[in-house]
Image (cartoon, rainbow, N blue to C red):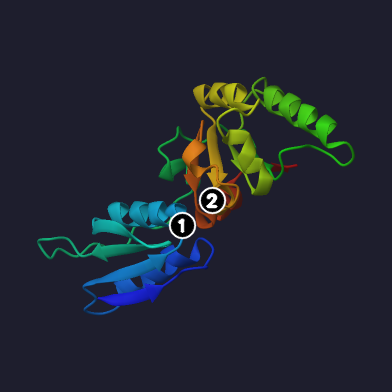
């Protein structure tokens, strides 16, 4: 099997590199070395979604991911990277905007005030009709989907209303919130890019 050292590479590079290696003629599989659990999870989604065998093991500070052809030798076409809402099994498009939240506070100035404002903004999203198609969290915005965040209850209401709630995997890994995710799903940057590209409109704060 081809060995890919993807340690230190941000998403979605490990997934894309693994897909390319698996698409090579006569490829039996690939071993991918990564340095965070989010990359492992993204590789697993790709492997499961394309009908391949998947396993991983911890090796010191790294993870060794093995992706192989199916046991019966069947060939599987690579499934396209779908928008984040489809990948996470959310409901279909609502017609509402995609909201991109890039920080755990809103506006410039006093950070305490900014955190109050972002909580009020997330609550206001629950009152929109139609509901947002999705709310995506980047950078320190990832803190807003973690256990204990004041925005979690309102984000759960958004999910109940049909909105997708997605957190950038690289961001969750950086802020160490991946294991404390309280609402929504962790997705990679390719899924986020696809979601934004297909959105009827985007609101960014």
Residue drawn at the location 45% of the way across and 32% of the way down: 91
User: Between 32 and 138, which is closer to the camera in this rendering?
Assistant: 32
**69 relative position to 165: left or right:** left
For disc 1, the marked residue is: 36
Residue drawn at the location 44% of the way across and 57% of the way down: 39
Quadrant hosting residue 132? top right
Graded by Cα atoms within 10 Å as few (under 14), some (14 to 19) or many (20 or more), the crowding at tag 1 reads some
For disc 2, the marked residue is: 173
Whether residue 1 is visible, yes or no, is: yes
- Quadrant containing the N terminus is bottom left
Height in image: 20 above or below 41?
below
Height in image: 182 above or below 50?
above
User: Between 64 and 74, which is closer to the camera in this rendering?
Assistant: 64
**48 relative position to 193: left or right:** left
**Marks 1/2: CA distance?**
7 Å
Q: Earlier in the sequence, mark 1 or mark 2?
A: 1
**17 relative position to 147: left or right:** left
- The reply to whether dot 1 and dot 2 touch (C-beta < 8 Å) is yes
For this orientation, the residue located farthest to the front is 60
SS for dot 1: loop
The percent coordinates of residue 54 (x first, y second) are: 26, 57
Whether residue 201 is visible, yes or no, is: no
For this orientation, the residue located farthest to the bottom is 25
Height in image: 60 above or below 107?
below
Height in image: 107 above or below 19?
above
Residue drawn at the location 90% of the way across and 40% of the way down: 109
């Amino acid at each position: 099997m081809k060995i890919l050292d993807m340690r230190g590479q941000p998403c979605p590079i490990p997934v894309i590199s693994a897909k390319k290696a698996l698409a090579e003629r006569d490829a039996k599989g690939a071993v991918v070395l990564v340095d965070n659990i989010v990359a492992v999870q993204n590789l697993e989604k790709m492997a499961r979604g394309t009908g391949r065998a998947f396993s991983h093991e911890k090796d010191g500070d790294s993870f060794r991911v093995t992706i192989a052809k199916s046991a019966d030798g069947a060939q599987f076409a690579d499934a396209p990277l779908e928008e984040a809402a489809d990948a996470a099994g959310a409901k279909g498009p609502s017609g509402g905007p995609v909201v991109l939240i890039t920080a755990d506070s809103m506006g410039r100035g006093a950070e305490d005030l900014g955190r109050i404002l972002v909580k009020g903004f997330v609550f206001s999203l629950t009152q929109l009709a139609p509901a947002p198609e999705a709310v995506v969290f980047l950078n320190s915005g990832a803190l807003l989907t973690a256990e204990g965040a004041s925005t979690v209850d309102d984000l759960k209401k958004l999910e109940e209303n049909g909105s997708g709630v997605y957190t950038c995997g690289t961001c969750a890994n950086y802020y160490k919130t991946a294991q404390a995710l309280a609402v929504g799903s962790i997705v990679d940057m390719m899924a986020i890019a696809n979601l934004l590209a297909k959105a009827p409109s985007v609101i960014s704060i």
